[in-house]
Image: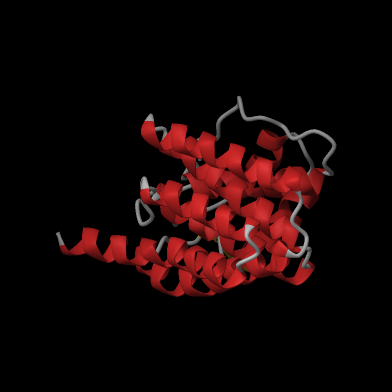
Amino acid sequence: MPIPSDHLKPIRLTAKESAFSQLQQWIIEGTLQPGEKLNDTELAKALGVSRTPVRESLQLLEVQGLVKMYPGKATQVTEVDRESIKDLLPPLAALQSLSVELAISHLTDEVVALLENTNERFAKAIRSENYYSALKIDEEFHQIIVDAAKNSYIQSMLASLQPHVSRLFFYNSIILTEKSIAEHADIVKFMKNGDGVKASSIMKNNWLRAIEEFQTSQST
C-alpha cells in the first residue's frame, strides 16, 4: 500500500480530524486505489497517530461512501462508478442553487469581491490548463456562496457530496471548461442585482452541464 511520506500535516486539528482529512484526500486523488484493502496499523504509522483516530476516520469515510468496512475481514476503498455522476449532480445542483438564493440576503461587498477574485484565479487556472488547481478554486468559489447562505443543513449535505464530485474529476467523469468562467461571472452579476431566480438558474445549469458533457464524451 504505497503511501507518500511528504504529505502536509494539517495544523490545529485533532488526530481524528487530521487522519480523516488526509485519508479522504488520498482516496479522492487515487493514492489509495479503488478496491484497495486498508490496514489501519500501516495508516496510523504513516499519519503519525494511533490506530483509534484512524479507525474512527474509516467509519466516517464509510458513511460518506468512500470505504466499505467488512467487520472481522477487511476495509476497502469503494470502487468508482463514473456513471454515478447522473445521480450525484442533480441533488448537488439543487442545493447549490438554493444556496445562491439564500446568499443574496447576506451579500456584502467583501463577499462579492472575494467571488470575483476567485473567478479570476479560476480563469487563469483553466487557461493555463492547470485543471487540478482549477478544481480546487472552483470548490472555493462555490463554498463562498454556501458559507454566505448561512444554512448549516445545506453545508452539511454538500460536505457529504463534494468528495464524490472531486473523486469523479480525478477519474475523468467531470471536465472543467471555459464555460464555467462565464457562468461564475453571471452568477455574481445577478447576485449583485438581487436576482435570485436568474442566479439560481445559472448555478443549476453550471452543475448539470457536466452530465451532458460526460454523456457526450462517452458517445464519441
Q: Is residue 129 among what the camera can see?
A: no
Q: To which quarter of the image does residue 187 belong?
A: bottom right
Q: Could you say where residue 20 lies in the image, as x and y percent from the top left?
A: 70, 50
Q: Is residue 16 left or right of residue 58?
A: right
Q: To which quarter of the image does residue 95 belong?
A: bottom right
The residue under the point 79% across, 49% down is 16
The residue under the point 63% across, 72% down is 98
The quadrant of the rendering that contains the C terminus is bottom left
Q: Could you say where residue 158 lies in the image, as x and y percent from the top left?
A: 64, 64
123 vs 213: above or below: above
Q: Is residue 29 left or right of residue 8?
A: left
Q: Is residue 96 left or right of residue 108?
A: left
Q: Nearer the viewer, residue 76 or 162?
A: 162
Q: Could you say where residue 214 lies in the image, as x and y percent from the top left?
A: 30, 61
The residue under the point 68% across, 51% down is 144
Q: Could you say where residue 110 lies in the image, as x and y percent from the top left?
A: 75, 43
**Number of dots carrying numbers:** 0
Q: Nearer the viewer, residue 147 or 167?
A: 147
Q: Is residue 128 left or right of residue 189?
A: left
The residue under the point 68% across, 59% down is 146
Q: Residue furthest front?
A: 193
Q: Residue furthest left?
A: 220
